[in-house]
Amino acid sequence: MSTLKDLLANINYNIKGRSPADLELAGLCLDSRQAKQGWLFAALPGSQVDGHDYIEQALANGCSAVLCERWPQKIAAKVCYIKVEKVADALGPLAANFYEQPSQQLALVGVTGTNGKTSTVSLLYRLFKKLGHKVGLISTIENRIDDEVLKSTHTTPNAIELQALLAQMRDAACDYVFMEVSSHAAEQGRIAGAHFTGGVFSNISHDHLDYHKTFKNYIFAKKRFFDQLPSSAFALVNADDKRAEVMLQNCSAKAYRYAQKQLADFRFRLLENSLSGLQLELDGQEFHCSLVGDFNAYNLLAVYATAILLEEPKTEVLRILSSLKPPAGRFEYVRIPNNPVQAIVDYAHTPDALEKVLQTLKATTSTGRIITVVGCGGNRDNSKRPIMAQKAAAYSDLLILSSDNPRFEEPEAILDEMWAGLSKAQQAQTYRQVNRREAIRWACQLAQAEDVILVAGKGHETYQEIKGERLPFDDREELRQALEEQLAKFV
Ligand SMILES: CC(=O)N[C@H]1[C@@H](OP(=O)(O)OP(=O)(O)OC[C@H]2O[C@@H](n3ccc(=O)[nH]c3=O)[C@H](O)[C@@H]2O)O[C@H](CO)[C@@H](O)[C@@H]1O[C@H](C)C(=O)N[C@@H](C)C(=O)N[C@H](CCC(=O)O)C(=O)O
Ligand SMILES: Nc1ncnc2c1ncn2[C@@H]1O[C@H](COP(=O)(O)OP(=O)(O)OP(=O)(O)O)[C@@H](O)[C@H]1O
Ligand SMILES: N[C@H](CCC[C@H](N)C(=O)O)C(=O)O
Ligand SMILES: [Mg+2]
């Protein structure tokens, strides 16, 4: 087994306390409450508190090493203190060493972008499974070690959990791992130390300004992922997004572009976009699948291009791709027998996603009305709230503003901020109902036979987070029940 000194091989550090040369770690943690005998505690300065304030607690729980950015006042002789410039940058490489470089032993592909990450990695996972590989998946909805499903708490796990998960995937003989790289993860060094075979950029639009403060910072957080790709990797970017070239500016990986609107290495042409699916010319081949919306054509093209760059056979890739379904809560239809109303649950929680989904509905719904139920999450970017309401009003015939996950905010106050994005005329035609169950019920009561209901923002989520509590709540279940209650209308 490696000593702590071995694990620090590629890291710049200073030492106090006991020597790392004869110290073998039993585990790693960044939460003092999870610390155990013989573990290393990484003291991360966070957004709420500073991990340095919890060093004593970690030691009381038996830790024998501490990774920190400044020396604690008390140095215990039996503990090894390692001081580095930034714990967030050192922790990933240390964790990768601890787990014996799992990402060097499989092909890891990361997908970043404001929207489309889960869709893309889920499609890649299913495609590569059907191509006969053992595959790992790291995503917002779930993590998978081939067929084994594990709960996901974040879109991208922290550096320790990520390396531990990759090690499990390596041990299960996975050849490929497809993972989402959130901007928070890139910024917080959660992916430091991971060796990528490829990186994909889907798009960037308004989100997370509560955390990144400016759009420029948000762009640079995503760019950090491309800056750290090795020269052996590929970097595949959506050239129709005007920030694609920024991603490539300091990237040493081999660049490839995909696009609809301009010349690129991989292209699609939209032949037909209807509520029953997409008809495309994909890389010169006629192609059909049941995924809806031109945004999904971009996701499919990114998946196809990734598979080709990983040297999978083109005909087989297209054949399998055309049979794939979207992941849970992404343009998911909810239908019940004898109720002709079309209802769709979608995870659109950004202005761009909401606009794209509604544009698709507008383009594919000829006779009926579009009825939208949408809210915005609490304790998240509040500058997107008026814009999301504006987009929803612009494309909907009937709009009901409701709660998403209010978290610790007042639901009515969130609605006020959304409301402010509407013109007086739009306000006069918009309903407000903070109770999401009631809002969905209203939508179903209002719907006539040809109408389409969109319930946006929560997608696959099976809870609603209110004042720190996660209460069971599933848009799809709520819709089913409310559509059921309305059956009498159609007999
Ligand atoms: C804003 C953000 O990303 N926060 C993440 C961050 O927390 P933080 O900086 O606030 O941590 P903190 O509470 O200040 O604590 C600092 C350090 O002290 C430690 N601590 C704290 C208390 C204690 O008793 N003992 C102790 O050791 C903590 O473990 C932590 O290491 O580091 C924590 C540990 O890794 C994460 O759990 C936490 O995610 C929070 C829960 C979160 O909600 N994050 C979301 C916004 C997020 O990351 N989302 C992206 C997806 C976004 C998207 O693409 O849509 C994701 O990748 O999931
Ligand atoms: N390529 C795309 N461009 C724009 N919007 C998209 C795209 N793909 C999906 N969407 C929209 O964004 C929503 C979220 O999609 P998805 O879950 O794939 O994104 P994500 O990037 O994983 O989101 P998160 O940051 O929450 O993890 C979808 O429900 C759909 O409305
Ligand atoms: N990854 C996103 C998900 C948002 C989903 C939406 N339902 C909300 O709760 O705001 C976030 O944490 O900001
Ligand atoms: Mg996701």
Image (spheres, rainbow, N blue to C red):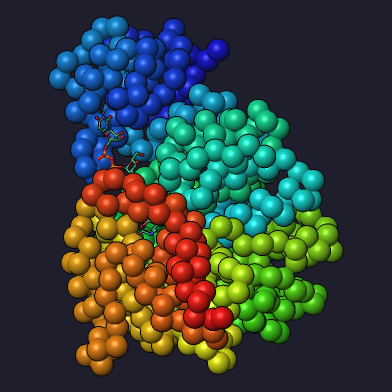
Q: Is 203 positioned to the left or the right of 384 in the image?
A: right
Q: Choose between 11 and 395: the one closer to the eye.
A: 395
Residue 430 visible at all: yes
Quarter of the image with the N terminus in it: top right
Q: Quadrant of the C terminus?
A: bottom right
Q: Is residue 82 visible?
A: no
Q: Where is 157 relative to 280, above or below?
A: above
Q: Tell me how many marks there are.
A: 0
Give residue 72's position: percent from left, percent from top.
Answer: 19, 22
Q: Residue at x 71, y 32 (%)?
A: 173
Q: Which of these two is toward me, 384 or 368? A: 368
Indicate whether 138 appears above or below 76: below
User: Which corner quadrant of the image does residue 449 belong to?
Assistant: bottom right
Q: Name the image quarter holding residue 397.
A: bottom left
**Residue 255: x percent and y percent?**
62, 62
Q: Residue at x 31, y 74 (%)?
A: 401
Say which residue appears at 44% left-offset and 20% top-offset. Answer: 27
Residue 299 in the figure: left or right of residue 18? right
Identified at 25% across, 89% down, the residue is 428
Q: Identify the image quadrant of residue 60.
A: top left
Q: Nearer the viewer, residue 24 or 317?
A: 317
Q: Residue furthest left?
A: 73
